[in-house]
Image (tube, grey):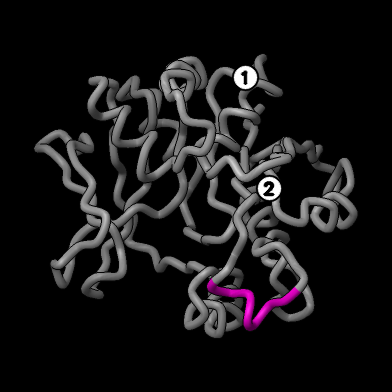
Amino acid sequence: MTTAIILAGGLGTRLRPKVANLPKPMAPICNRPFLEYLMDYWMKEGVKHFHLSTGYMFQKIQAYFGDSYRGVKVSYSVENNPLGTGGGLKLSLIDLDYLDNFLLLNGDTFFKVPLKQLINSFNKNNTTLTMCLFNFAEKNRYGEIILDNSDNVIDIKLKSASKKGLANGGVYMCKRNDLYEVLNSFDLEKISFENDVIKRIISNKYLINAIKFNEPFLDIGVPDDYQKAETFLKNMNG
């Protein structure tokens, strides 16, 4: 059974002028929360359990989804204080101590990845984490992922000065025990998954393999992308 942990605890400060009084993953698109579109896609791909890592205004997410969504189990971890995406993930892994491998998703981005292909790549390469990448052509917006000749991640540039390159699509297949060991190595309570955890995985010589997909990427936390979300998601589902 594939479990997806969705990082849904962010404050969404950039989006707040357009979406007030809601956590970012609940931002409405055609009168439906973004999180529904995300869960609908991954259910079609075979996810059988969603675990939502929540924090800011978590009550609104829990009240909407309850303990199941369209017959698929939904569970929650709640940050009482902001822990960052890495800290929120650690809390989720404590709650889900029975997990082996799992899918990890950002709760504010959409990237269309075939789950079977991702799992096959993850198993074949026997990695701690498999990261899904897309091609960007926009200077200074995305962090650039640097790969070696075997498509292993060797560095991340937080803001790329390049006009094109490979960026993180916010979709990962993960090995729980390796990842929890890395998360447990931080003294800080508040941890960023992308800025702190991934970099420590690389420095600790755990393996992060990358798989590239020629698919568009949506980040509703960016107001311009949020304005385009209706058309984007119609095309994804069309």
Q: Residue at x 71, y 36 (%)?
A: 48
Q: Distance of mark 2 from mark 1, alpha carbons? A: 18 Å
Q: Secondary structure at mark 2?
A: helix
Q: Which residue is mark 1?
A: 99
Residue 50 in which image quadrant: top right
Q: Is residue 129 above or below residue 237?
A: above
Q: Name the residue type under label 2.
A: Met
Q: Name the residue type under label 1.
A: Leu
For the record, the magenta segment spans: 14-20
| Crowd rating for badge 2 (residues with CA inside 10 Å; few <14, some 14–19, many 20+) | some
Residue 15 in magenta stretch: yes
Q: Which residue is mark 2?
A: 43
Q: Check the image and name the residue furthest to the left.
A: 149
Residue 169 in magenta stretch: no
The quadrant in which the C terminus is found is bottom right
What x and y, as percent, mark residue 30? 73, 81
Predominant SS of the magenta segment: loop
What x and y, as percent, mark residue 29? 69, 77
Q: Is residue 140 above or below residue 149?
A: below
Residue 51 in which image quadrant: top right
